[in-house]
Image (cartoon, rainbow, N blue to C red):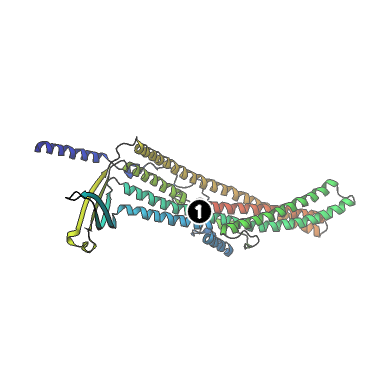
Amino acid sequence: MSKNYEKQNSWLFYSIFFFCYGCNPIDPARYSNLTNLSIPKSFQNAINMESNSSLINWYKTLHDPNLNILVARTLKRNLDLKIAKKTIEELKYEFLKTKTHSYPTIDLQGQVTRQRQSYKTKTPTGKEITIVNITNSFNTSIVASYELDLWKKIYFEKQASRLEFLKSKEDANILVLSIISTCIENYFDLMTLNRKLDLYDKKIKLLNKLNKIYSTRYKIGLTDFFTYQYYKNLLLETKVIFENLIKQKKYIEQKINNLVGDYPYTGNIKVSDITIDIKSLSIPKTLPSDLLKRRPDIKKAILNLKQKLSNLGYARAIRFPSINLSGNIGYISDELNTLIKPESRIWAISSSLLFPLFNMGKLKYNEKQKEQSFYKSILEYQKTVLNAFFEVESTLMERRELENIYSIYKDELNNRTKEYMFQKRRQQNGIVEVSTLLEKELNLIDIQIKINDTRLSILKNQILLFKVLGGTYHKE
């Protein structure tokens, strides 16, 4: 009999051992090489220029106090950023709440019960009577419970919650980069528009003079109708452009106020009257590709990948048994005045095992779904990295083209300026008419407008480069 009992116990022991041995949790190290990408050490289109700037906030090197104040004000008051900060706090406390699952729970329990029980019986004389019993019960105890995390279920749950919290931080960093970029871009738009409005105002004045000249000539027959109409129409077109620029300026001012978190007023944004030297926006000679590791969207993609792996680990762990330990110690008595007595003391220790036995493959399919979600996150990470390289390379390539165009326009401006000065001397000597000099001056304004627009494009390219590199050129 004892041998059979020992044999049964042996079989039970080995069954439990091999079952537990087969319950293998997810090992993150197995997936460490799935994110490898073949990438170059530097960017192909890096511009061969030197830079002495080492500031993360590169725009401060422009020494524009109005821009610095505007960016600081935007970062302080932007409502989207405030919402993002609250989201971070929300997920922080969610993570802290999940961390508590690793520790035992201890509760103080108290109970008072008063029970009335009645029944009928007969006396020895045969008379039927009702007996009423009233009993009291007082109970107080400390109850503790703890789940053994043998399969890392709680560990993976904590990891997933922590990674969600860290992802919210990277979301906030993405938002900060976007808001700073948008704020500076709008500021440069406004600065360029002010300069452009001045140039178009000068152009309108020149065209008014030319219209008077050609109107007088047309009346006395010295100019043909088409030349007269050309300058008349050109004046009207320029006035329309001028009005559209004013409307555009008001719209950008409203955008800036909305970004800052103010009422969308117009005319209240201070913009410095300076011309930014394009050479001051130089780019380092070499840009190592590992700079992209600091991009918040890439950091978020890595965190998302790790979170999906934690979700997969949790999905596998819940397929295994849950083992809980519980116990309580306290007092129980029929009378309140004898509750806290040694003879009223009680205690109990227990353990429980919960094993998912049959659910039509629900947990199995849940694990498969989490596994596919994890592999999808790997592809999303690779896509994010390649997209980051595309953004940097295309921005650097555009920068090279813009600087070439800017250089051509500057050469054209120098040539037209020399031509204008030459015609001015001739006009002063009475060799050419005033209209010829005004036309040359008009050509000068047109090329200045092109330079102004190209400078804005380079400034926006600089902002975009700041954004796609994660906020700075230099390693932190």
Foreground residue among 247 and 10 = 10
Decide if residue 25 is on the left or right side of residue 266: left
Decide if residue 467 is on the left or right side of residue 265: left
Q: Is residue 136 visible?
A: yes
For label 1, the SS is helix
Q: Position of residue 34 (x, y in %)?
A: 38, 41
Decide if residue 359 is on the left or right side of residue 341: right
Q: Position of residue 352 (x, y in %)?
A: 25, 46
Disc 1 crowd, CA 10 A, few/some/many (<14, 14-19, 20+): some
Q: Is residue 295 visible?
A: no
Q: Which residue lies at the image location 25% right of the left edge and 51% below the top edge? A: 118
Q: Residue furthest right?
A: 220
Q: Which residue lies at the image location 19% right of the left edge and 59% below the top edge? A: 344
Foreground residue among 329 and 274 = 329
Foreground residue among 104 and 110 = 110
Figure quadrant of residue 373: top left
Q: On the rendered image, what quadrant is the C terminus found in?
A: bottom left
Q: Is residue 62 above or below residue 20?
A: below
Figure quadrant of residue 108: bottom left
Decide if residue 151 is on the left or right side of residue 413: left
Q: Which residue carries the number 1 mark?
A: 175
Q: Is residue 201 above or below residue 150?
A: below
Q: Residue furthest top?
A: 360
Q: Amino acid at mark 1?
A: Leu
Q: On the rendered image, what quadrant is the N terminus found in?
A: top left
